[in-house]
Every structure is written in structure tokens, then in C-alpha cells.
Amino acid sequence: MTANAQFGVGGGSKIVGKISGTLIDSLTKKPVDYASVGLYNSGGKAPITGVITDTKGNFKLDNLHPGRYKLVITFIGYPNKTIDPVVTTDGKPDNNLGNIYISPGARILKEVAVTGQSSIIENHIDKIVYNAEKDITAAGGTATDLLGKVPLVSVDINGNVSVRGDQNVRVLINGKPSGATSTSLSDVLKAIPADQIKSIEVITSPSAKYDAEGSAGIINIITKQKNVSGFSGSVSGGIGTRQNNGNANLNYNKNRFSFTANIGGNAGWPQTSLTDFQQSIHKDTINTFTESKGTSVVKRHAVIPSLTAGYQFNSFNNITSTFRLTQIEFNTNSNSVTNSATPYSSYSIGHNVIDGFDWNLDYTHKFKQEGHELDLSTQWTHNNGTTDYTNYYSAVFPNIQNNIDGINNEYTFQVDYTLPISKVFKLEAGGKSITRRLTSTSNYFNYDNSGQFVFNPVTSNLYNYNQDVWAGYSVFTITLPKSYTILAGFRDENTDIHGDPVNASQNLSPFSQNYNTYVPSLTIQKQLTATQTLKLTYSKRITRPSLQYLNPFVNKSNIQAQTVGNPALNPEVSQTVELNYTTFIKASMVNLSVYYKHTANLIEGIAAPIAVTVNGVIEGGTLTTFQNIGNNNSIGGSFFGTFTPIKILNIIANLNAYTYKPDPAGIFHLDQTQNGTYVQYQGFLRATLTLPKDYLAEAFTFGSSPRHTIQGTTPTFSILGIGVKKQLMKKKMAIGINAIEPFSKYKEFNSSLSSPGFTQTSRFQYPFRSFGLTFSYNFGKLSFSNPQQQKKGVNNDDLKQGDQGVGGGAPPSGGR
């Protein structure tokens, strides 16, 4: 990036020049982006101006008169680096300092010990980065385990992900969507081994360059790839009492060709959970009380292999292709005993499979001007989702079997263009099309007198769903005097939806929707000093209802807790204003923000009491329908920081709190039982000790408050973990032990729901305690090459990601 100045210690020369350079991490040999470079007069204490390094670590200070200057470089987790003097003259007004190396984790000033550990959390100009590969308790876990440790992110008991309490978040893998997440995001995250993850990025206020979908923002999971020359690889894994993980990675980079192969997976031991449910219904002719207790055993396994190949034809043209497979399978066996009008017991068998692939092809053309480039990207996503369940009842309800098969094909074409018009002005523009074609087949089978399940064409159904999205955007970056930077953008998206439900007994009509969404974005940043930044952002986001929210067929996998979609749903629209302050104090960082968020057309599931009549016996139940219930205004604030009180100890803390006060519209105020203003929160605390002889120790905890809807609350969630790791063979090998929830076998989760005519409570106990052994080994002979530009490509951060689970027989939803 570039800064302008008109100062210098020297004569009155009218000649102006520049000071430039590239900031490089001395250990990884990779560029350090978004570091602060402050310009001073040589020997001076007051900064003249400053600049932030770009994504390649480059910086440039323009319009400098010949003289003697001092540079002070600051970045979280690194000691300040001072270069004094830096001299420019009339004969040589430009001074290119070349590569400037800084060492991560080095102690400040006169301290000798160097830890060599980069920061686990980084705060960039547009995102927060969690460096998962630095987490010693991550080995043996999954992406779900890691996400709970990321600032501003929380994960509930079902694996549903939220940012600042909002579950309308878009999750990407290496900047691209995965077709498997369209069926079940929570199950995909549980399938990705933590050993496969390099870092996790959180973008709370995306610019107009990103898809408008996801009111909470974007989470981008970056997998491990090495940008080096030669042949290298790694193997890692873990064996534990809850699950076993493994991951293997091979990298080859020679001349212009690069190739990476990776395979990771996990296999869980059978986990038994306990459930306790009570429901009371008193409405019209329904007067029932139901109480049930049960157990559920779940066993799951997953394999995710991928191949990436790239070729750089010359300095201006390169091509990259990635092929990723996903295969997830889990089985559930449940037993319960129910006391109601007629007591009965039930037994359920469930089988779920998610498999598919994502194939990307990306081409980049660089023009002669630095930063001037054109990117073309395509992606084909194919995904199959299968949910089969069989329910057996001792009385009241008939035995039933349901097989749901979903197929999702998604085709994306994208073009991005970047043009630095001048030293202070940059233009980014592009377009995108997404074509989604989904089919969901739900076949029901009735239990006949011979003890066989027979296909029932009357209750079976077919659902075809098509969605087309067209988008275009422009983003302008303007660098102003006095260390101001403006990022302004505008995006226009058109969405066309068509659904066709087919059933032999229900007269359901096809439906269509078409709407246009205008999405502006604005960021104003002021570099107060070389170590302090103030940022004001405005963003507008939408959340499109996906397939399971629109599917008009009733899901009866639980006959007494049915759900149904609503084809008339409108997308949620949210607008957020945020003020953010960041400061670096030696090796510590503090980030504070306050924000206001208005959400229109808020989507929530509204439960209503129903009567389930079988053979003249009335049993109570609920039918949950997704509705646009009204608006919500939220005020929130967040804090996170990293601290090093003593040389061997690093502490990371994060806290986010916000209000929930919905304003139901029309008849939905009749369903509201949560009438107050509720403060909801989540937090994280972590401490890491760097011990002698290459030992590392760590402890962490995170948790969140109950989440509210207009009808009730969802459970609190918290986790405690500890771990120790020993590094061997010059840190090429490591072994470790870790424990999650060592002091309690089960975590208890309580929730409640109420509305006129019914109340219900549930208690769910899940076994979280686990002990495990972990290992990792890196091999190969490497030489670091010049880092290539970060690959761009398809980035479908779009669609409301539903209940983020296949469970309960929900048909696959599309294209997220």
C-alpha cells in the first residue's frame, strides 16, 4: 500500500521520491500483510505518516523530499523493527529496501530469548485470523472443535455455527463453498480433521465484492498447503476415547508446476446421549401431557481427500485446479419410553450419507502494471444426500419408514478485475452467475399385516427446486492524506427461484420468486499512529431462505414434533454499523468494537399445538412453520486481545455481548412469550506456556449464554480443555496428550419453548469427556520460493444455511 508525505530532514529540494520494501517473516519466508510501517524523521519521536503492507507484504511511501528518515515496523506477535537511518538524496530519490525480515514471537528490546512462535490470533484490516496450526489442543479434534475458539464465533451442541450470535453465517473452505455443506454444514464441520486446517478467517463486514448472503458475515477455513520448492509432506493424527483422526499431506513444487494431495478423516466411537422431554398442550379440544425418556447411540465416520495442481505459464498467466471429495456417514439408534394418553415405547434406526465433490478451475492473468489483473473462475459442485429412518412403536402410532434422497448440482462462473488507476485510487469490479438444480425424493413405506414395509404413493413426494443468481459489483479503494483510507462498494444481485412440489394427494401448486437486492458497503479507516487504527464500517447483507425453509411438505420424522417449510418466505435483510479500534502494545494487541444491527423480515420457526389422532386416541404434538416474524434491533460490543505478561506465558481472551429484542409483526405477537430485552454473550479464554526442552502446555475454555427466540430459549454451551505437547527431531515431530471436559462425563443442555396453548421443556445430556494421544511428523527437503499471489476463485458465500443438520429427515437443501 502507499502513503503520501511532504517532509524530510534535508534542504529545500523540489525533487520527491519514495521509500519502498517488502516485509518477510524470517521463519516461514512468507510476506507479512497488513503490518504497520511508520515514517519518522531520523532520530525523531513523532510519526510523519504511516502505511499498511498489502497482501504481498509490499509497502510504499511516496512524495518524500531527499533526507534522512526512520522506519518503525509493527505487527502483532512480532517485536517492533526500527530502521534508522533510511537515506534518500537528490541523485537517488528512490530507496527500495528490498526484503525486510522480521522474526515472529521475539521478545522486545534487550531480551535474548526468541520463542519463534507467531501469534495464534491476528487482526487484519478486513478480518480476524485464527492460526489453528499453532493450537496444541487441536490435534485429534475437528473443525467444530476449533471454531468454538475463534473470536466472535460460537458453536452450539448441535454443531450450528454463529458469529456474534447470528447463525446466518457463510462457511467457505479455501475461499470456496463446499457442496456437502448444502446438505449439512454441521456434519461437514465434524468431518474435517483439525490437523487439516491451517487457519480460520472471520469477516464480519464483507465488502460489496463478496456475495450479499449471510447477515452475520463469512467464515473461511484455510487448509494446509506449503508454498515451497521441492518435495515435502506430513502425517498427523490422534487416538482418543471419543474419536480417532488421521491426516496425510504431500506437496511437490518444481519450477512452474505445483501439486498437493491430501486425505483426512475421522472415525468416532459410539456415543450414547440421554434425553428427557415434557410437553403440555391445552388448546381447544386438545388437553394432553406427554413425558418421554430415552437414549440415543450415534456412530460416525468421514473421509475427505483432495488434489490441487497448478501451472505458471509465465510471469503473467497461471492456472490452478482443485478436486475435493467428501464422504460422511453416520448411524443412529434410539430408544424411548413415553407416558401420554396411551403409554408406548419406540425404537428408531437412522442412516445418513453425504457424498459428493467440488471441482474448481481458476485462471489469473497479470498485466504489466503492478496489481492490474484479471481472474476467471469456475466451479462445479455435485452432492448426494441420503437420510433413511425407520420408526417402530409398541402402541398408538403405526410403524413407518421414510427414505429421502437429494441431488444437488451447482454451476458457478465468476470474473474479477482489479485496476490500480493511480497511487491513491484502485478499482475492483466483477460479475458472477450461480445456477442451482436440486431434486429431493421422499418415499414413505407403511407397515403391513405381514410385517413388511410397503411403498405408499399417497404420502410420498417429489420436490424440484431451481435457483439462479446473477450479480455484479464495483469496489473503490481510496488512499487519502493524513492516513485515511476509504473502501466503498456497491453490489446488485438478482435472484430467481422456482419450486415444483409433486404429491398424489396434496394439491400443491408450483411457486416462483424473483427479487433484486442492492447491497452497498463502506469502510473508513484512520491510521492514528503506527500502532493504532480506528475503523468505521457499514454493510448490508441478505439471508435467502434455502430449500428446507421453502419445502411445503411436512417432515414427520418425529410425529409429535413436525416441521414444514413456507414457499412465501422473504429473505432477511440486515444492516450493520460498526466502530472498531485496534492498538498494539509491544507484543500484545487489544481490539474493541461496538455495533448496531437492524434485521428486517427476521426468519424464525413458529411452533403451534396440533392434535395427532390415531385409532380414536388423541395425542398432542407441535407443527413448526418457518415465518418472517418481524424485525429485530441489536446493540452489541466485542473485545479480544492477546497478552504476554511474562516471557513464557501467552493469554488470549475474547468476549462478545449483544441484545435481542424482536418486534413481531401482525399475528406473530400472539406467539411471543419472550417479551424483554435479552443480553446474549459468548466468550473464550486461552493460556499457553512455552516450557524448556521444547515442551508446550495449554488450557482453554469457551462458552455461550442461552439464545432466545420469540417463543423460548436454546441451551447454554461451554467446554474446558487442557493439553501438553513435546516437540522432537528439531520440531519435525511432535507427540502430545489432551483432555476435553476431564471432570464431567456428560454435558447437560436444557431448552424451553412456550406459546399460547402449549409449553415444553427438554434436557439433553451428551458425553463430551475425552482423553487422547496425538502425533505429527513433517518430512521432505524444502527451499522457500517467492510466494505466489493468493489464489482467487469462486466464493459462493450465499444462502441461509438452514438448521445446519440433516437430522430429522430434513431433505437436502441447496447450494450454500
Image (cartoon, grey):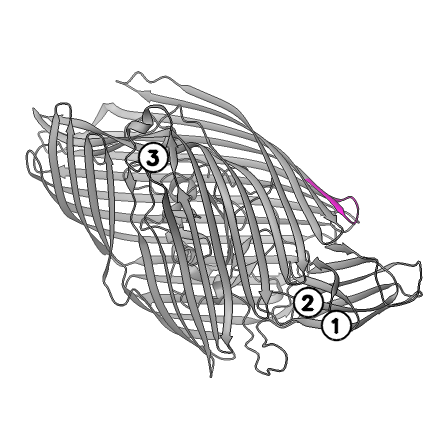
Can you tell which of label 2 and label 3 is closer to the viewer?
2
204 relative to 199, above or below: above
Q: Residue at x 80, y 71 (%)?
A: 42
The reply to whether residue 574 is in sight is yes
- Contact, mark 1 vs mark 2 (Cβ under 8 Å): yes
Q: Secondary structure at mark 3?
A: loop
SS under mark 1: strand
The picture quadrant where one finds residue 662 is top left
Vertical relation: 446 (above or below) 696: above
Distance from Cα at disc 2 to Cα at disc 3: 53 Å
N-term-proximal mark, 1 vs 2: 2
Residue type at mark 3 is Pro
The residue tagged 2 is: 73
Residue 504 occupies which quadrant of the picture? top left
Q: Is residue 122 above or below residue 515?
A: below
Residues at marks 1 and 2, CA–CA distance in whole angstroms: 8 Å
Q: Name the residue tied to disc 1.
A: 83
